């Protein structure tokens, strides 16, 4: 006897119950769809609204906390200072260049990063909402299917093997 048959014989009851439950669940969903006109529709929700520009202007702290700090920790400004020094650019010009970088980082955060973060959060919330809505809408049908499946499987076991319910004492 090969290992597949051995495993199948060991887990025959679980396999039968899972198969009967799946088929019963599919049948109950088809009947519910036909008689009750039940359909699951994916909804796109946007619970987090895009902040207005004047609130995004407060993104200065967010810019400093993320991008500016990361560039600083990567020694970007030190390398930029060395490059400016190498090409003979004055310190005041270096400061102006840092200010321009700050403005570009602010624009990046205000018009790219914050909308991107809001879109990602809205998509994630929408996906979780639809999964939860689907589960909530199918729970009654799952209960009906589980009850029917249990009755069918237990009836089958009782009819075929009455000794399955007898406890053997050694």
Image: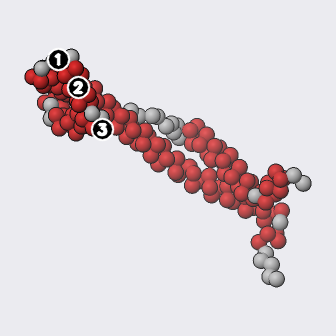
Q: Residue furthest bottom?
A: 170
Q: Secondary structure at mark 2?
A: helix
Spatial distance from mark 3 to mark 2, Cα to Cα?
47 Å
Q: Secondary structure at mark 1?
A: loop
Q: Earlier in the sequence, mark 1 or mark 3?
A: 3
Q: Where is the N terminus found, in terms of image quarters?
A: bottom right
Q: Relative to residue 84, is residue 113 depicted above or below?
A: below
Q: Are marks 3 and 2 in contact (CB under 8 Å)?
A: no
Q: Which residue is at the front of the view, 168 or 58? A: 58
Give residue 31's position: percent from left, percent from top.
Answer: 61, 42
Spatial distance from mark 1 to mark 3, Cα to Cα?
53 Å
Q: In the image, which disc is placed on residue 160?
A: none
Q: Residue at x 27, y 38 (%)?
A: 73
Residue highlighted by disc 3: 47
Q: Residue at x 46, y 43 (%)?
A: 131
Task: Please identify the quarter of the rendering in which residue 68 is found.
Answer: top left
Residue highlighted by disc 1: 88
In the displayed structure image, the side of residue 104 where residue 23 appears, left or right: right
Q: Which residue is at the front of the view, 165 or 168? A: 168
Q: Residues within 10 Å of mark 2 (few under 14, many from 20)?
A: few
Q: Where is the C terminus found, in terms of image quarters?
A: bottom right
Q: Residue at x 21, y 16 (%)?
A: 87
Residue highlighted by disc 2: 82
Q: Residues within 10 Å of mark 3 (few under 14, many from 20)?
A: few
In the displayed structure image, the side of residue 12 where residue 148 appears, left or right: left
């Amino acid at each position: 006897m090969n290992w597949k048959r051995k495993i199948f014989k060991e887990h025959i009851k679980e396999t039968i119950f899972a198969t009967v439950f799946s088929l019963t669940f599919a049948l109950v969903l088809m009947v519910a769809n036909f008689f009750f006109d039940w359909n699951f529709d994916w909804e796109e929700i946007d619970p987090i609204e895009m902040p207005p520009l004047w609130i995004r202007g407060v993104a200065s702290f967010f810019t400093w906390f993320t991008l500016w700090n990361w560039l600083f920790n990567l020694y970007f400004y030190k390398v930029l200072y060395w490059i400016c020094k190498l090409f003979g650019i004055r310190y005041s010009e270096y400061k102006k260049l840092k200010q321009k970088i700050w403005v570009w980082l602010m624009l990046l955060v205000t018009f790219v990063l914050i909308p991107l973060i809001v879109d990602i959060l809205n998509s994630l919330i929408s996906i979780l909402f639809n999964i939860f809505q689907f589960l909530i809408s199918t729970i009654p049908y799952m209960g009906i299917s589980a009850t029917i499946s249990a009755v069918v499987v237990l009836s089958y076991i009782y009819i075929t093997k009455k000794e399955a319910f007898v406890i053997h004492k050694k």
